[in-house]
Image (spheres, grey):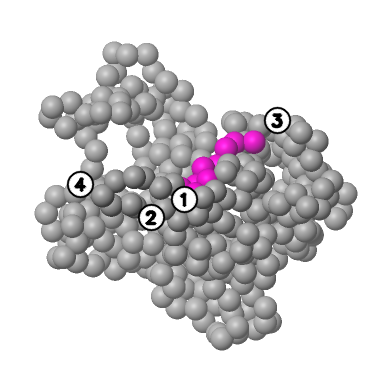
Amino acid sequence: MSGLVVHSCITPYQPEVQSIGRALVVEGLVSDQPGPYTVTLSQTADYTYTGLNLFVRGATVTLSDNAGTNEVLTETSPGVYQTSANGLRGVVGRTYKITIRTSDGHLYESTPEILKAAPPIQKLTYEYRYNPFANTNDQRNTWDVFLDTQDPETPGNYYRWVWRNYEATNACSVSDDANEQGIYSGLPCCSDCWNINQCYSNCINVSSDVAINGKAISRQPILSVPFTSRNIYYVEVEQQAISEGAYRFFNSVKKLVNNTGGLFDAAPSTVGGNLRCTSDPDQPVYGYFGAAGISVMPLKVDRTKDAVGNPIFKRITVDYLAPCLICENNLYRTRIKPRWWDQ
């Protein structure tokens, strides 16, 4: 696509558009933790550096292992496919792959990955930190979370760390705009409900044991807790034992995100995944489906002391006279109580 010339006193320069056309994007993971497991399918659109991904509906997604076990996933929402709660569960030592048949007849397959056990998380700690130069009070006051673990003596171990924060909520729907007092209106949940907060594309955290094989991993940074409330901040941290291929993929994505600010803002052809189109080898496909052993540990961060000033949060008034809404289980909300919530 050529640059557009505007006839005026100043002619702005518009560089050539970067476009990769339509392609399937796959994200998913099977682990040795209880399911369900999720696979997300989207499709890139012709775009410039402002990315747009479209959900892929009506596909048949099958998860299988080398022992002959397989399960067809259910599309729970547009582009989101899940195993059943009591369905296939990952087993250490087995290899796993997915096959995808899209509604247009294309067939895709991931490279089989062996599921390796993850070493246990030894401990999680946090430290309060005050940054007087931050723009907002929720960022001036933070609590940095660190992880300690022991790398096995065998070489070739690769790690990924992810976290999820759960916050109890009474509002299952919140207005888009606040009133004159800066307060948002909300509709009540019909049951207990928790909002799920986690970092996705711009905080990929991976490492390998190339330089530290068999040694302790101490004070591995995990996240920085913001001052959005004086309530206890409940977080579950996962230590994933990933494959070398997954490590290389996420490392490439991390560099891409740091350069452009979004997972697929720049042409992702530089990011090598583990999927291919078996029905048409020339058909591009991006993303990664992996298998990982996972060690999980909870942490409750006390924000009732140390912090300076007041927390910054969205003020919501719940209308309890209105009909309640179902707390739906999805990537951002759950009605299932976090497993260590009461401990």
Circle 3 residue: 58
The answer to whether the residues at label 1 and label 2 have Cβ atoms under 8 Å apart is: yes
Q: Nearer the viewer, mark 2 or mark 3?
A: 2
In the picture shown, does residue 102 fall above or below 291?
above
Q: Secondary structure at mark 4?
A: loop
In the picture shown, does residue 209 fall above or below 110?
below
Q: Main secondary structure of the magenta part?
A: loop
Inter-mark Cα distance, 4 to 2: 41 Å
Left or right: where does residue 255 sit relative to residue 304? right
Left or right: where does residue 90 sit relative to residue 311? right
Is residue 241 at least partly visible in the picture?
Answer: no
Farthest residue toward the right?
68
Is residue 218 at least partly visible in the picture?
Answer: yes
Circle 1 residue: 3
Q: Which residues are magenta?
A: 47-56
Circle 2 residue: 13
Q: Nearer the viewer, mark 4 or mark 2?
A: 2
| Mark 3 burial class by Cα count in 10 Å: few <14, some 14-19, many 20+ | some
From the viewer's side, name the closer residue of 280 and 181.
280
